[in-house]
Image (cartoon, helix red, strand yellow):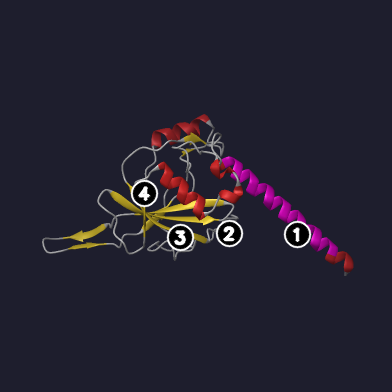
């Protein structure tokens, strides 16, 4: 989650004149076993469907909890959904060593990080607080101008650290389609609000 190939990112920006046309390549739940476009339908963007897709892609993924420790070579992950809109993952990072001597090691709590699309990974929630427990963290990004609020908690998982994933360009996956659908809904909602406001003004 925290890794980005700088050379590929720079080439992408160079090829697209540093514009927002630069698109990274993302894994989509369901890609590995042939259901890449399963989440194109908004009614399937829910915890139950995502749970099935990620476990079908990698059967070694297991359900966990905030307090459980994952087996060796596995990391803790938290999944959340803005139902009918989008899904989001949080990854638990190992503690960072602050100081160490012969007697003891002082380190941080194992915080979680999240990564929105091709943006850099961060260890703070929607309102800038460190993410100790993503289930309790702020996941409402609407105040930033987004229409995403990841209200539904799908739970914690233990996921393997090694292994490859199947990727697809944004033109092939549902990312751009979902964003287009969200923009269309926003325009429709804004138009509806303007019409209601106009009607109230006429009555007054």
Q: Which residue does the numbered mark 1 point to in the structure image?
A: 193
| Local SS, label 3 | loop
> Badge 2 local density, few (<14 within 10 Å), some, or many (20+)?
few
Indicate which disc, 4 or 1, sits on the residue closer to the N terminus. 4
Q: Which residue does the numbered mark 3 point to in the structure image?
A: 125
- Residue closest to the eye, 61 or 66: 61
Which mark's residue is nearer the viewer, 4 or 3?
A: 4
Indicate which disc, 1 or 2, sits on the residue closer to the N terminus. 2
The number of numbered badges drawn on the structure is: 4
Magenta stretch secondary structure, dominant: helix
Q: Which residues are magenta?
A: 176-199
| Local SS, label 4 | loop
List x then y, in percent, for residue 37: 55, 39
| Local SS, label 2 | helix
Which mark's residue is nearer the viewer, 4 or 2?
A: 4
Q: Are marks 4 and 1 in contact (CB under 8 Å)?
A: no
| Local SS, label 1 | helix
- Residue closest to the eye, 54 or 173: 54
Indicate which disc, 3 or 1, sits on the residue closer to the N terminus. 3
Q: Which residue does the numbered mark 2 point to in the structure image?
A: 142
Which residue is at 33% across, 39% downward? 163
Q: Are marks 1 and 2 in contact (CB under 8 Å)?
A: no
In the image, residue 107 above or below residue 114: below
Task: State the separation of the CA atoms marked 4 and 1.
Answer: 44 Å
> Badge 3 local density, few (<14 within 10 Å), some, or many (20+)?
many
Indicate which disc, 2 or 3, sits on the residue closer to the N terminus. 3
């Amino acid at each position: 989650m925290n890794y980005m190939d700088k050379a590929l990112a720079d080439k992408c920006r160079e090829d697209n004149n540093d514009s927002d046309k630069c698109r990274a390549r993302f894994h989509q739940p369901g890609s590995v076993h042939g259901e890449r476009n399963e989440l194109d339908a908004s009614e399937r963007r829910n915890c139950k469907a995502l749970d099935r897709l990620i476990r079908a892609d990698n059967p070694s993924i297991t359900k966990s909890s905030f307090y459980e420790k994952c087996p060796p070579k596995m990391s803790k992950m938290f999944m959340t959904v803005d139902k009918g809109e989008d899904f989001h993952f949080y990854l638990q990072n190992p503690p960072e060593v602050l100081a160490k001597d012969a007697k003891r090691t002082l380190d941080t709590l194992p915080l979680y990080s999240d990564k929105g699309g091709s943006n850099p990974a961060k260890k703070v929630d929607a309102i800038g607080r460190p993410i100790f427990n993503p289930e309790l963290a702020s996941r409402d990004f609407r105040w930033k101008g987004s229409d995403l609020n990841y209200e539904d908690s799908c739970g914690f998982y233990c996921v393997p650290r090694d292994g490859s994933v199947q990727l697809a360009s944004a033109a092939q996956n549902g990312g751009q389609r979902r964003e287009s659908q969200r923009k269309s809904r926003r325009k429709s909602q804004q138009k509806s609000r303007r019409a209601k406001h106009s009607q109230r003004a006429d009555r007054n």
